[in-house]
Image (cartoon, grey):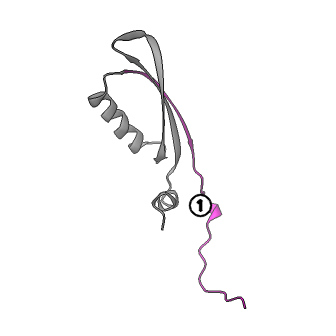
Amino acid sequence: MDNAFKRQLDGYGLTTAQIFYRLPDQPSLLQQFIWQEYDLAPEFPELKHFLDFWNSSIEGALHSVRIAHQRLIRPTEIKAVNGVITVH
């Protein structure tokens, strides 16, 4: 089973983060980075992990982060089927 599909079944949704930051050599310019991954709202552990990495490894100081999140598969859209149907 595809890992992304499995994560969606576990409740993960597609999260897009618009990250604004400033570089040390150009503090007057506001830069933008787009990050997208399957994540679990409202805790967003994957995004938090990425932002922790950013703060420890990248010189660009974070200004702000805007988040959009959408579950692509909802519980009502999945039905467990018990049985096999054979069509000739």
Crowd rating for badge 1 (residues with CA inside 10 Å; few <14, some 14–19, many 20+): few
Magenta residues span 61-88
Write down the quadrant of residue 43 in the picture: top left
- Number of numbered discs visible in the structure rendering: 1
Residue 53 as seen in the image, left or right of residue 80: left
Q: Secondary structure at mark 1?
A: helix
Instruction: Tell me what residue is drawn at x 32 percent, y 34 percent.
Output: 52
Residue 76 as seen in the image, left or right of residue 49: right
Instruction: Tell me what residue is drawn at x 62 percent, y 86 percent.
Output: 84
Identify the amino acid type marked 1. Answer: Pro
> Quick check: is 82 in the magenta stretch?
yes
Q: Is residue 37 above or below residue 28?
A: below
Write down the quadrant of residue 53 in the picture: top left
Tell me where residue 20 appears, x and y as whole percent.
46, 23
Tell me where residue 56 appears, x and y as whole percent.
27, 30
Query: Farthest right residue?
Result: 88
Instruction: Tell me what residue is drawn at x 43 percent, y 42 percent.
Output: 44
Query: Farthest top residue?
Result: 28
Q: Nearer the viewer, residue 4 or 81?
A: 4
Query: Farthest bottom residue?
Result: 88
Query: Farthest left residue?
Result: 56
Tell me where residue 78 appears, x and y as whole percent.
61, 66
> Quick check: is 4 in the magenta stretch?
no
Instruction: Tell me what residue is drawn at x 48 percent, y 63 percent.
Output: 2
Q: What is the quadrant of the C terminus in the image?
A: bottom right
Q: Which residue is mark 1?
A: 75
Q: Is residue 26 above or below residue 68?
A: above
